[in-house]
Amino acid sequence: MDNKRIEAAVREMLAAIGEDPDREGLKGTPDRIARMYEEIFGGLNEDPGKHLEVIFQEDEHEELVLVRDISFYSMCEHHLVPFFGKAHVAYIPRGGRLTGLSKLARVVETIAKRPQLQERITSLVADTIMEKLNPYGVIVVVEAEHMCMTMRGVKKPGSKTVTSAVRGIFKVDAKSRAEAMSLIGMGVGSRG
Ligand SMILES: Nc1nc2c(ncn2[C@@H]2O[C@H](COP(=O)(O)OP(=O)(O)OP(=O)(O)O)[C@@H](O)[C@H]2O)c(=O)[nH]1
Ligand SMILES: [Zn+2]
């Protein structure tokens, strides 16, 4: 990431909105934003699949594994304001190829730390797991609140966007899909 370039751009934006980039409170802001971008866009130059290279061979387990409520923060690529919420990741390992549970959360994190669309996070997490673990199937559900819909624009605080990506056996087997969705808390009637 080119921190100097980010700093110059932030200075320019502050001046453009009519602020004085040299006043006491704003002096350090370009540098702070550059360092913040390094952190919140840190997934840009990272391959999310690298987290799935840790594999445990556990031949017995060819049943559902679900990590629910993985919290994440991302930046909407249209407005560069945050959207955030929870991702739920379920897969059925094939041939006992299990990964570490935290690694599923790391995949979500790497993909979220880029200018993003919620749909792209959802499908990229699913596709990365399919590619690296070759499981029977994957379901990813993401629920998020978009600041660009709450603090501005249409102004609908509390609205939640839910997206899902379904791969492998879950696409054809309605029963396993329903089981996974109900454990995720997205089953029929589970929201009252
Ligand atoms: N599909 C999708 N849309 C998103 C996401 N984040 C923000 N958006 C939408 O992107 C759209 C951009 O619409 P535009 O009409 O180009 O921008 P705008 O004039 O700022 O639109 P409003 O937000 O309706 O005021 C808006 O409808 C946002 O709600 C996302 O993750 N996925
Ligand atoms: Zn937006």
Image (tube, grey):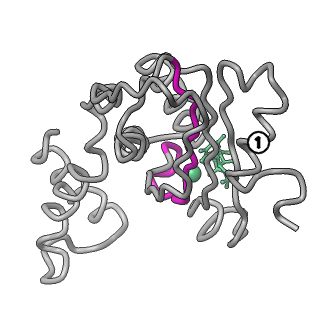
Residue at label 1?
Answer: 179
Q: Nearer the viewer, residue 80 or 69?
A: 69
Q: Nearer the viewer, residue 108 or 172?
A: 172
Residue type, numbered disc 1: Glu
* Residue interval drawn in magenta: 77-94
| 60 to 110, vertically: above or below | above
The answer to whether mark 1 is within 8 Å of ligand 1 is no
Label 1 neighbour load within 10 Å: few <14, some 14-19, many 20+: some
Find residue 155 and report its image quarter: bottom right
Give coordinates of residue 44: x percent, y percent: 30, 35
Q: Is residue 178 left or right of residue 72?
A: right
Q: Residue at x 42, y 41 (%)?
A: 104
**What quarter of the picture does the N terminus occupy?**
top left
Q: Nearer the viewer, residue 137 or 33?
A: 137
Please tell me whether residue 78 belongs to the stretch shown in magenta: yes
| 126 to 141, vertically: above or below | above
Secondary element at image label 1: helix
Q: Residue at x 26, y 31 (%)?
A: 46
Q: Is residue 128 left or right of residue 69?
A: left
